[in-house]
Image: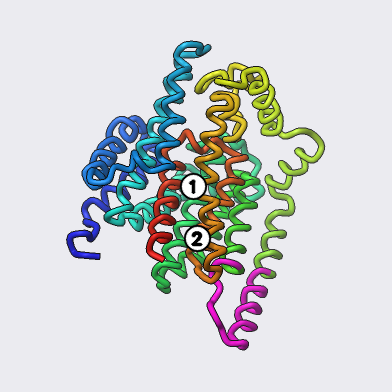
Amino acid sequence: MNKTNQPKLILGLFIIFVIIFLIALGPYFQLQYIVTMGLLPILAGISFLYDSKDLHLKKKEFFIFLTLFLISFTTIFYYKGFEEFTSTLSSFFGAVISAYIAIGLTKRIDYSNYIHIGYIISIILLFLIMVINGNITTNFASAIAFRDRFMLNANAYSYFCIFANFSLFYLYLKYRKNLILIFLILLPILFLIIAFTTQSRAGLLLITLINVSFWLFVNKPVNPTKFRTIFRKFLILSALVLLIFQFLKIYEGSRIQNRVAKTEHKKDSREVLIEEGIEVFKLNPIFGVGLGQFPFYSKYRLFTHNSYTEVLAEHGIIGGVLLFALFLIPTIQSIKNYRKDKNNPLYKFYLLFFITFLIYNNFYVFYKFPFSMMYFFLIITLQKNDTVSQ
């Protein structure tokens, strides 16, 4: 990379600031509107300056996402709640410009490291805020407390943990630095503590699975000696056994265990919301009921907590096709890359991310929010860059 194409530190620090303000500081100081109305548009303008020679509006995935956003305006003709439409549209718009920021600041001049660092710092700040607010105690797993006591939605913390965890994976694979390795070992433990504290079942499961997958599948040495292979497997197995015993010790009697036990005897609210979403789609198959309108058709008055049923219920089959295309195109590319070179750790990293993202969209509506779509398009662009360069 030429000196003229080197990322500028000042802009990099600004990117980090915008991300931590989006995820942690904005909610803490109750200044989220500064992010959506100021910081994100400013960063999008800077991205446009970097991207003006080769507009990413032409890029396939971004065009699909932009089209999905534009068809949301049809809701104006048949909405039930105008406030719900406008508030969801505002968040959706933030998701679109966040996606543009990720690709615009990663294609020609690579600012991806700053974006990754922003996500990692954000979850550390959120953890510190939890400590300040008295949400983290020594009995974090078994404390009897309501899940709505947190600054954010309880499940949101695990969403941030997943993205920060993947950022650690990527930075380690890219640089192989001992300092990053230390963070890669220690921070997932912090993420599990957060998942236990917020009683996030999906977070607890996926944080565990992606870390096990990273060490056993992604970060495998190429052509190692027999001794190194045996020693590595022994070391990983020993660490896993110790962690499993500690995990089970914490899990027994934890609040998460109680939540799991309850769902074994009755339907979880998420299952009911998904069923409601499917029923709403059946009754409104072409255009759906409109952006942000599904809660009016739900007895819980909540969104579906599932991207696939949400887009079908609110945008109909047209929106469903667009979203499935958006998610599947980079996933299929990651599978092709992996088949082409099964020893490339970055190809395995991308495959792990997109499969995890497809699964995680069953637990939350990620396509409407800036923090998730910025990260999704970051990984899309990084994969494209690495695909071209190989």
* Residue at point 69%, 31% (across, down): 269
Among the 4 quarters of the image, the one containing residue 155: top right
Residue 90 versus residue 63 in the image, above or below: above
Residue 290 position within the rendered picture, expressed as x and y whole percent measured from the top left: 52, 19
Q: Which amino acid does label 2 sit on?
A: Leu
Magenta region's main secondary structure? helix
Q: What residue type is labelled 1?
A: Phe
The residue at which mark 2 appears reads as 187
**Which of pointers 1 and 2 lies earlier in the amino acid sequence?**
1
Which segment did they paint magenta? 217-240
Quick one: label 1, few (<14), some, or many (20+) residues within 10 Å?
many
| Magenta stretch: includes residue 222 | yes
Among the 4 quarters of the image, the one containing residue 138: bottom right
Residue 75 position within the rendered picture, expressed as x and y whole percent measured from the top left: 48, 17
* Quarter of the figure with the C terminus: bottom left
The residue positioned farthest toward the right in the image shown: 265
Residue 164 position within the rendered picture, expressed as x and y whole percent measured from the top left: 46, 54
Residue 59 position within the rendered picture, expressed as x and y whole percent measured from the top left: 38, 43
How many numbered discs, if any? 2
* Residue at point 45%, 36% (across, down): 64
Residue 265 versus residue 171 in the image, above or below: above
Tag 1, which secondary structure?
helix
Q: Mark number for residue 160?
A: 1
Residue nearer the viewer, 367 or 40: 367
* Residue at point 57%, 63% (across, down): 339
Residue nearer the viewer, 356 or 327: 327
Quick one: label 2, few (<14), some, or many (20+) residues within 10 Å?
some
Contact flag, marks 1 and 2 (Cβ < 8 Å): no
